[in-house]
Image (cartoon, coloured by chain):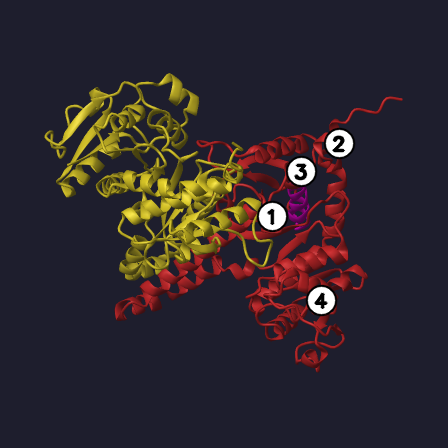
Chain colours: A yellow, B red
Amino acid sequence: MITIAVDCMGGDHGPGVTLPACAAFLASHPDARLLLVGRPEVLQPLPAGLDPARCTVVPATEVVAMDDPVEVALRRKKDSSMRVAITQVKDGVAQAAVSAGNTGALMAIARYVLKTLDGIDRPAIATQMPNAKGQATTVLDLGANVDCTAEHLLQFAVMGSALVAASGRQSPTVGLLNIGEEVIKGNDVIKQAGALLRQAAERGDLNFHGNVEGNDLFKGTTDIVVCDGFVGNVALKASEGLASMIGGFIREEFSRNLFTRLAAVVAWPVLRSFKRRVDHRRYNGAALLGLRGLVFKSHGSADAFAFEQALVRAYDAARNQLLERVRARIARAAPLMAPADAVAQPAPNP
Amino acid sequence: MITIAVDCMGGDHGPGVTLPACAAFLASHPDARLLLVGRPEVLQPLPAGLDPARCTVVPATEVVAMDDPVEVALRRKKDSSMRVAITQVKDGVAQAAVSAGNTGALMAIARYVLKTLDGIDRPAIATQMPNAKGQATTVLDLGANVDCTAEHLLQFAVMGSALVAASGRQSPTVGLLNIGEEVIKGNDVIKQAGALLRQAAERGDLNFHGNVEGNDLFKGTTDIVVCDGFVGNVALKASEGLASMIGGFIREEFSRNLFTRLAAVVAWPVLRSFKRRVDHRRYNGAALLGLRGLVFKSHGSADAFAFEQALVRAYDAARNQLLERVRARIARAAPLMAPADAVAQPAPNP
């Protein structure tokens, strides 16, 4: 039995989306239980489809708003649904927590409540993007960390490898996001990170492919792409913006006049099949990695289908023992993660 | 009369693409002259369509290869078509130079031959991306500079404003590329750059909108988006990768079977019109800004239509006196561009 704690109040839509998603998830996962965290007056009585034998309401009196500053979420709202859900993981009552609430607050609370794993300076946010091979590229970090050091990038690579390996892909390849070879080949941090990743590959800690560029995210050149949170966040949001623009153009062109509307009817099965392939909802559910517990973040604007995917991702991670895998990989790569000056330190004279 | 020096040998295809593009460009620009730079044995006799009264072959015996290291291009190939084209600008024989050659070499040679403008530490590469408003967002830097300071970002903003204003847009808006508000709001450089841009706006040097995110590139929230070259390069290439993946999916879905092929025939006018809207060739031609002369960079893989757009962009810039505009704006904003410690320096005691 896998138990997931769900922040039912988070996201743009709250229980209107999270509860139907929970019902759909339970229907397809007979060995799962859910802790529905939130205001009891909103969650009870349980709507039809939520089997009371597999759902328990865990009361929380407060809700972190999407625009709450991190300080407010962390220090003032100690009984928020987000925090209570994460506390279920800390207390060992749930194997993972899922929230569609504000990312900054979720990361801060998760870090405060769960703490980071030994050897991890900063947790990272990892998500999947669809690629041209029909698979998914796992990208991290997506915005939790700006100004990363080479050691942080190595930690992201190790944690990302654990995440992808947990989903059954043996020895996943890691790419280091860099800029075109024909220009200056990255800054000092990237060069140092490249050297560390090569060392890690030689030691058998991970499978390093080498540098990749922005277009490789969608080519699917590597299973994992590692970058600092600023770059990752910009790349993700630029891609969302472009996809949305292209979708808008397609809609506009097909609804221009009677002829184009007819063409849309004829092309409908093709367009539907295309839309399914680029449906970002299928990739919803980012992992917060590097904590002493599993936490997954859903997009704030997720609908029930998308939120259900985040629940599935959390369930799979718990089932495939992601936490133990991350811990083991980090421990194995620990010698490379010590700050360079500590490694270079000569033994003290007797 | 506007004279443009064209590196006819550069790019993946060389004269096979550049010469037809030159012919098409001359046909639509009766007051333009071209200096065709390259190996005379390849360029002469001039193909039909290139009026000898408006085209002069300028001999250059060497060619910078797409994979030549910067050092080789700069120090060993002193008679390259790229360098000779730029020298025409330095010597005042041409008002702008255009090349589809290797970006790193072009930037290095342009910088060496032309030098930077007073007040500019580093030239930047500015390009246009289509946006959902049906206009274009001008983005810089695209890869010339990694590890930028706040003052560099201010210089990019000032030069970008001159570029967009030269195309007739009064008081273009500037956005500073940052990450989601709900996460940590950027690193120290970005925060300092934000403060400098606000000061510049108060002084009337430019029109600062504030922070923007990756998706704003394609929403068209601001006319100009400023970022360091690493982030800009990744965002551009990620967008190219996504656009190419989506294009591939559309082709695959429409060629799946007999029915979908028929649907493609019916939808053809709509698909063609859509394709035109997202045709990246229309946006070909990046400006190298901050030099004492105008240089434009075409995509290496450009076809004749795309290379012609780069020629048009160079022509428009020369016609609209981009160089003088950049120089004037930089001079006006100079007090903000001095390094902070120099500004804070107290007057020496008598």
Label 4 vs label 2, nearer the camera = 4
Q: CA distance from mark 2 to mark 1?
A: 25 Å
User: Few, some or many C-alpha atoms within 10 Å of disc 4 (few <14, some 14-19, many ≥20)?
Assistant: few
Q: Which residue is mark 2?
A: B342
Q: Quadrant of the N terminus of chain A?
A: top left
Q: CA distance from mark 1 to mark 4?
A: 28 Å
Q: CA distance from mark 4 to mark 2?
A: 39 Å
x and y percentages locating residue A291 in the rendered image = 35, 33
Q: Earlier in the sequence, mark 1 or mark 3?
A: 1
At x 31% / y 60%, what residue is drawn? A262
User: Few, some or many C-alpha atoms within 10 Å of disc 2 (few <14, some 14-19, many ≥20)?
Assistant: few
Label 2: which secondary element: helix
Q: CA distance from mark 3 to mark 2?
A: 13 Å
Amino acid carrying mark 4 in the image: Arg
Tell me the number on the disc at residue B76: 4
Q: Which residue is mark 1?
A: B141
